[in-house]
Image: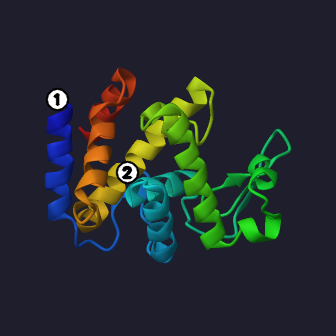
Amino acid sequence: MIKKVLLFVFSFSIAFSFETKIFIGDTYIPENFYKYDKEFKAAAKKYNIPIVLLKAITLTENATFKHNIIGKNKNQTKDYGLMQINTIHLKRYNINEKDIIKPSVNIEIAARLLHEIIQKHGFSWNAIGRYHSANDKYKNIWLNKVTKHLITIVLKDSKELFMMEKFRLAKLTTLLINVDKKQYDYLVTWIR
């Protein structure tokens, strides 16, 4: 069944790859989506993470794609920039609040953080979800949003996905095929 879902998504993406703006439910790709492509490509290459995944995480964390966003959390921490890097990581990566707002630094640190999580837990939805939270409830809610954004990006710009190196495309396909039952059911329901 997941293969049918993927086939549907990839087939549909070819038909709509030339649209300037695409909506799926309440999800859309903002006009400034490509503004930081250079930074995303550099980080994706350096840490061997599919660019489409980094961008899906960014859309989940920051739907406006604005680089100077600062989110305040209930636990008194803050989330900075495009990819909403939490305060707890600043000291660890020797970065200050001024620098973490810079798109190149923010994307680099986010990709590095995700890479370290994947190295520790393997390339899986569980590992990717840990970018947001180790708590299963919050992680799964967040992963459902990432899945929606991933599909939105594929529908918007299938060319970017198909031009990826074969290895990275295979890793992403494996990731989508290996989603757990709850995420699979959500994905199938959402696409219908």
Categorize mark 1 by other alpha carbons within 10 Å: few (<14), some (14-19), many (20+). few
Query: Mark 1 = which residue?
Result: 1
Q: Amino acid at mark 1?
A: Met
Residues packed near mark 2 inside 10 Å, few (<14), some (14 to 19) or many (20 plus): many
In the picture, the quarter occupied by the C terminus is top left
Q: Residue at x 32, y 26 (%)?
A: 185
Judged from the image, the secondary structure of the residue bearing numbered disc 1 is loop
* 148 or 120: nearer the viewer: 120
Q: Is residue 73 visible?
A: yes
| Whether residue 25 is visible | no
**Tag of residue 34:** none
Most foreground residue, 120 or 185: 120
- Left/right placement of residue 168 relative to residue 139 reads left
**Quadrant location of the N terminus?**
top left
- In the image, taking residue 43 as reference, residue 149 lies left or right, namely left
- Between the C-alphas of marks 1 and 2, the distance is 19 Å
Q: Earlier in the sequence, mark 1 or mark 2?
A: 1
Residue in the image at 18% along x and 52% along y: 10
Q: Quadrant of residue 153?
A: bottom left
Name the residue carrying label 2: 150
